[in-house]
Image (tube, grey):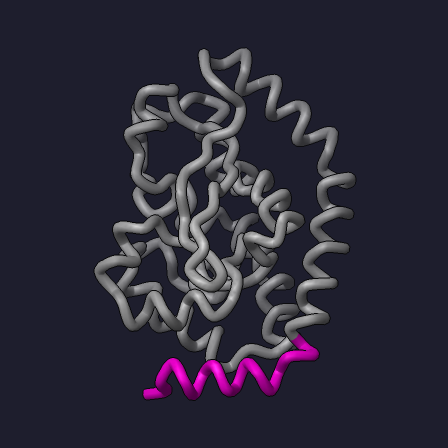
Amino acid sequence: MLTKEDIELSLQRKKLQLVIKRIFDVIVAGLLIILFSPLLIIVSLLILFSSKGPVLYTNERIGYRGVHFRCFKFRSMVVHEQQMATDGVLYKVKNDSRVTWIGSIIRKTSIDELPQLFNVLKGEMSLVGPRPLVPFMMAGLPDFNEIRCLVRPGITGQWQIEDREHNTSADYMMKPDLTYISTYTLLSDLRIIIKTPIVVLKAKGAY
C-alpha cells in the first residue's frame, strides 16, 4: 500500500497537471454558474416559497491541507431538521419526512450540489476530488485524513461514479478516494466528469 510520502511525491511530479487542473476548475465553474444561473434563481425562489428558512445550507468540511471551510448546498430540509443533519449526502434516506418537496427533487437530480461551484471558485474545492467529509468522520481515520488533504475535495469523484448506493460509509469511500489521489491524471478527471451526468440521470444512489 502506498504511503502518504509516496503519494505526495507522485503529486509533486504532477505539479503542472495540478496547475492546469486549477485553471480548468476556475474556468469551468465560472461558465457553469453563468449557464445555470436561471436554474439557480428558480430553485432559490422555490426553496424560499416551499418552507421558512435560508436558501443555502452550509456545514463545516475539511479541505485541502486540512483547512476547514463551509460547504454550500441548497437547503433541502425544513430548517430545524437541516441544522440537525450531520451530512446531507452521506446520510440520505428514502422517504425522509424532513425533506421538502423541492428538496426531494433537487436531491434526486443532484441540483442541491450546484452551489458548490462557488466553493470551487473560492479555491476550497475542485470539480473532481475526494468527497469532502465532516470533521468527526475524518477524526476517526487519521492516516486517511492526511492523504485526503493532499488534494482539494471535489463536487464529484471516483466514489460518486461507482456503486455509491450500497454503502456510504467513510470506510467504503476510502478505497476509491485513495485510488483517485494516488493515480491522478487530467485524463482521469475528464473520465469522471464525463461519467457524472450519466450517473446523475440514472439517479443512482440519490434520493
**Picture layout, residue 50 above or below residue 64:** above
Query: Which contiguous range is marked in magenta?
Result: 1-17
In which quarter of the view is residue 87 placed?
A: top left
Write down the quadrant of residue 28 in the picture. bottom right
207 in relation to 101, above or below = below
34 left or right, relative to 137:
right
The x, y position of residue 188, in whole percent, is 59, 74
Nearest the eye: 71 or 201: 71
4 in the magenta segment: yes
Position of the C terminus by quadrant: top left
- The answer to whether residue 203 is magenta is no
Q: Residue at x 41, y 85 (%)?
A: 5
Q: Is residue 43 left or right of residue 78?
A: right
> In the drawing, does residue 6 fall left or right of residue 190?
left
Q: Predominant secondary structure in magenta?
A: helix
- Residue 9, placed above or below residue 115: below
Task: Answer with the quarter of the image where residue 77 lies.
Answer: top left
Instruction: State the image coordinates of residue 144 (x, y, percent, origin top left).
Output: 32, 70
Q: Residue at x 44, y 28 (%)?
A: 76
Depth order, front residue of 201/174: 174
**Where is residue 198 drawn, in percent x and y?**
58, 56
